[in-house]
């Protein structure tokens, strides 16, 4: 079984990509399943085969511990790691080729508290990869691009998996798409774009950040996709296949 973790900023398209990849693998004669790891989600664009909400009930947490909504969300995320054996049993019983793991909307809770890292380290699969989705609509300037690249590098350091950077909503950013892909693929193009920014202080900081990310090999290829037109899904599946089937995993 190959595990694909789908992470990204809130509302970037994680759940919709989970649903699209599910259909992609079904269409290509594989047996994929989905695992929803978001205890607080109310609606999903797919029917999860395995669901953390069957094990963690956020309303019950609110009532039992007298917590407000934020406290309950934090607690529910902290409990994810404690449910790993139950989830593993359910998944192993289904015995899929691929498991698509839709991670919680609040990436800071999943990645920076202990549960996400613990889950990824201890959930058993033959190989694993993660996708980090940058919301295309948020990448409106070179400085924003650097700031999201920094977040991506930070998530990569926390989750310690082979990570693919994906730019979502390409259908909404047609005019800026070429620029963004240039910034991602060429440090020179990005540094030149940063030179043209009005705010010198943030431009200089962004240049230093991007140099450090680049020098440490933390910059990744960026694949643009649309969850609506499905443009880019073929390229994404090819990169996933390369990582998952040929063991190109980064070991820290
Ligand atoms: N136009 C366009 N809309 C998208 C795309 N991907 C996602 N959306 C829309 O963005 C919104 C959020 O999508 P989701 O798939 O729920 O995003 P998410 O990352 O799972 O959201 P959270 O789990 O709440 O953080 C929905 O309204 C989607 O229809 C895309 O590629 N293009
Ligand atoms: Mg979601």
Image: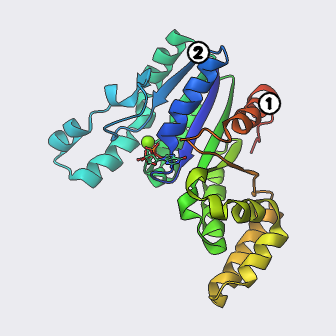
What residue appears at the point 65 percent right and 41 percent down from the top-left corner?
231
**Quadrant of the image containing the N terminus:** top right
Q: Is residue 200 above or below residue 120?
A: below
Residue highlighted by disc 1: 247
Sooner in the amino-acid sequence: mark 2 or mark 1: 2
Q: Helix or strand or loop: what does disc 2 sit on?
A: loop
Horizontal and vertical percent position of residue 46: 43, 28
What residue appears at the point 71 percent right and 34 percent down from the top-left corner?
234
Corner quadrant of residue 141: bottom right
Report if residue 123 is visible in the image.
Answer: no
Horizontal and vertical percent position of residue 219: 75, 58
What residue appears at the point 78 percent right and 25 percent down from the top-left corner?
245
- In this view, the residue in front, 214 or 136, is 136
- Marks 2/1: CA–CA distance: 19 Å
Residue highlighted by disc 2: 96
Horizontal and vertical percent position of residue 150: 64, 64
Mark 2, ligand 2, within 8 Å: the answer is no
Q: Helix or strand or loop: what does disc 1 sit on?
A: loop
Is residue 238 rendered to the left or right of residue 225? right
Is residue 54 rendered to the left or right of residue 221? left
Is residue 24 rendered to the left or right of residue 238? left
Find out whether the residues at labels 2 and 1 contact each other: C-beta distance under 8 Å: no
Horizontal and vertical percent position of residue 12: 51, 51
Q: Is residue 63 above or below residue 32?
A: below
Q: Is residue 191 above or below residue 148?
A: below
**Quadrant of the image containing the C terminus:** top right
What residue appears at the point 63 percent right and 42 percent down from the top-left corner?
131
Is residue 52 rendered to the left or right of residue 209? left
């Amino acid at each position: 079984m190959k595990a694909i973790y789908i992470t990204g900023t809130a509302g970037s398209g994680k759940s919709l990509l989970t649903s699209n990849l599910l259909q992609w693998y079904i269409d290509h004669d594989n047996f994929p399943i989905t695992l929803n790891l978001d205890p607080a989600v109310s609606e999903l664009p797919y029917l999860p085969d395995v669901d953390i909400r069957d094990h963690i009930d956020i309303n019950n947490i609110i009532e039992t511990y007298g917590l407000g909504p934020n406290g309950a969300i934090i607690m529910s995320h902290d409990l994810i790691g404690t449910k790993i054996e139950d989830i593993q049993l359910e998944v192993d019983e289904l015995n899929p080729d691929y498991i698509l793991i839709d991670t919680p909307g609040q990436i800071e809770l999943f990645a920076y508290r202990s549960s996400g890292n613990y889950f990824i380290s201890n959930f058993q699969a033959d190989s694993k990869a993660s996708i980090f989705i940058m919301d295309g609509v948020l990448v409106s300037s070179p400085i924003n691009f650097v700031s999201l690249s920094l977040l991506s590098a930070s998530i990569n350091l926390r989750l310690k998996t082979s990570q693919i950077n994906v730019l979502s909503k390409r259908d909404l950013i047609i005019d800026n798409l070429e620029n963004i892909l240039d910034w991602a693929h060429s440090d020179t193009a990005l540094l030149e774009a940063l030179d043209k920014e009005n705010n010198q202080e943030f431009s200089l900081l962004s240049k230093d950040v991007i140099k450090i990310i680049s020098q440490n090999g933390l910059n990744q290829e960026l694949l643009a996709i649309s969850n609506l037109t499905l443009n880019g899904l073929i390229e994404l599946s090819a990169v996933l296949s390369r990582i998952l089937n040929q063991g190109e995993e980064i070991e820290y």
